[in-house]
Amino acid sequence: MNSINRLGIVGGIHGNELIGVYLVRKFQKYPHLINRNSFKSLALLGNPKAISARTRYIDVDLNRCFIGDNSPATKSSIYEELSYEELRAKEIQAILKSEDQEFVDVIIDLHTTTANMGICIIIGNIHPFLLSLAAYLNTINPLVKVYIHQQARNSGFLRSLCQLGFSIEVGAVAQGTLDGELFKQTENLVYAVLDYFEDFNKGEIPLIQNSFTVYRSSGVVNYPRNEDGDLAAMIHPQLQFRDYQPLNSGDPLFLTFEGKEICYEGESTVHPIFINEAAYYEKGVAMYLTQKELIHI
Amino acid sequence: MNSINRLGIVGGIHGNELIGVYLVRKFQKYPHLINRNSFKSLALLGNPKAISARTRYIDVDLNRCFIGDNSPATKSSIYEELSYEELRAKEIQAILKSEDQEFVDVIIDLHTTTANMGICIIIGNIHPFLLSLAAYLNTINPLVKVYIHQQARNSGFLRSLCQLGFSIEVGAVAQGTLDGELFKQTENLVYAVLDYFEDFNKGEIPLIQNSFTVYRSSGVVNYPRNEDGDLAAMIHPQLQFRDYQPLNSGDPLFLTFEGKEICYEGESTVHPIFINEAAYYEKGVAMYLTQKELIHI
């Protein structure tokens, strides 16, 4: 990586995550906010139909449709069988290329969550440049959390389309709503990222701490289900909104509708995140488990 | 009102308000929880299709479709033109009648909101019995808020179908999620209501305070909009989650995406509620304004 030349900022990949939607609209209206002397930025709405419909997606989750150029579908007859989001993913991949077919160097994918994730960046690819960026963001604002969830290239996530792709995930915010405080914090984080790239391009790498905390994905917990597959329990009130906090064996995890506690039985301490994310009910995810680690760079 | 004989408890009128959905499923599984010696209760899911689709409604808001028997539609040809929710409203009205066509005496309609409404009962019809019930609930739990939003009979709201219809509105909870603490509080409030009716039927009217606070609807505030009708501002961070708190002239109301504050300019103190309710974005409601009053009964 010699320099960052073009960058894509995408909001509204999920149509009911409004902070990204309205930030992108702001950036489209005032492009000077996201352009810098040494690079150009493109601000793009991910799922316009879902945004209009105030829903996460129309047919399928768009953020599982970015499979790069591996897709076999090229003939129009096959295109017709694709869902709206599969087609939109192809459109976005095309939009993120320049006239000479060069893909953007960086993708920033803006999301919100109903979990109490605060301000978090999600890295799917442990690239030294992304780790340096994460360290920088965590240096200037220690509240910025770093979540490492490794994904193969072209695994379906927008951020997996390029080496320097990552997501910004903020919460807790209800689907379909804006939160003024989190809007401002997300906006400021985007500017900090852009300033870092500008400094990098100029050869002025900012001073950063040489170690910082990351949360590394280590597993997933589904909801307890009854014989019909329906929910049998809720997130335990003592766990609700306690993302990133240590969970030890014997700590309450769920509360059944009958009022019975279900506790964590793992042997090692874990740090759950995405606790009670609305969109994950249908995916069978009550929370992700992570290992808290100090990374040295 | 001599006695309560039959009562309907409805959850999931909005398919993504899960506390009501799972409470009703619990009541259907364990009917002894909601039946009492002196009356029978019926627990009913409002909008099964929307519940399956994890969305508020399929075609239109079901809780604006309860127009009683005033509807002109009786012929099947007209029925075919009705939306799913208009048809479902008719079904629910039929289900709430007994075999001898007597309508339930009471409707309890369970809702959640993304606003910080706490535990609130909404009365659309100032019936002395409902006021006594509200006073009782507020006596045994002073955190129970009482909101009076007068509606004509058969005005479209489920609760408007009978004189003793009211809603329980709890929040803040994100659409599409459960909250264990608010689930328990809602459940306990339902039991308190049922116990009150049982006492009433036995002629044992519980001791209650003779005055209590209500919030009476006095207006509505829409979001600032741009020339295209789209949002131009968000709820101001200083107002977010501050439902029921006094708002005075000059207090911040909105924050534009450019960062400009928009303040309340009314002359009298108001107490906003339903601040930043997700479902009201499309209805043009940023919040309802209320007058805080002490009611003597």
Image (tube, coloured by chain):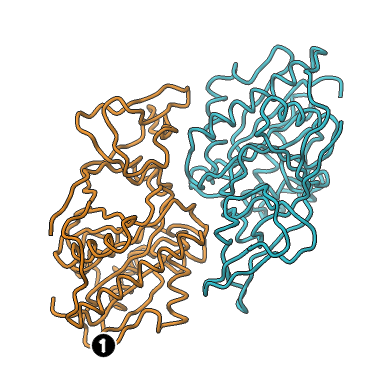
Chain colours: A cyan, B orange
**Position above or below: A214 against B91:** above
Q: Is residue B230 visible?
A: no
* Left or right relative to B257: residue A199: right
Q: Quadrant of the N terminus of chain A?
A: top right
Residue, x 17% and y 56% (percent of image)? Answer: B211
Residue B266 % position (x, y):
23, 29
Query: Residue B151 appears in which quarter of the rendering?
Result: bottom left
Q: Nearer the viewer, residue B201 or B22?
A: B201
Query: Residue B120 appears in which quarter of the rendering?
Result: bottom left
**Other-residue count near label 1 (Cα within 10 Å), few / some / many at <14 / 14–19 / ≥20:** few
* Left or right relative to A235: residue A68: right
* Left or right relative to B5: residue A65: right
Q: Quadrant of the C terminus of chain A?
A: top right
Residue A173 % position (x, y):
52, 44
Residue, x 35% and y 31% (percent of image)? Answer: B253
**Position above or below: A68 against B139:** above
Tell me the amino acid under the disc marked 1. Answer: Glu
Residue, x 72% and y 53% (percent of image)? Answer: A78
Residue, x 34% and y 45% (percent of image)? Answer: B283
Which residue is label 1 attached to?
B99
Residue B37 % position (x, y):
29, 87
Chain ID, mark 1: B
Residue A268 % position (x, y):
79, 58
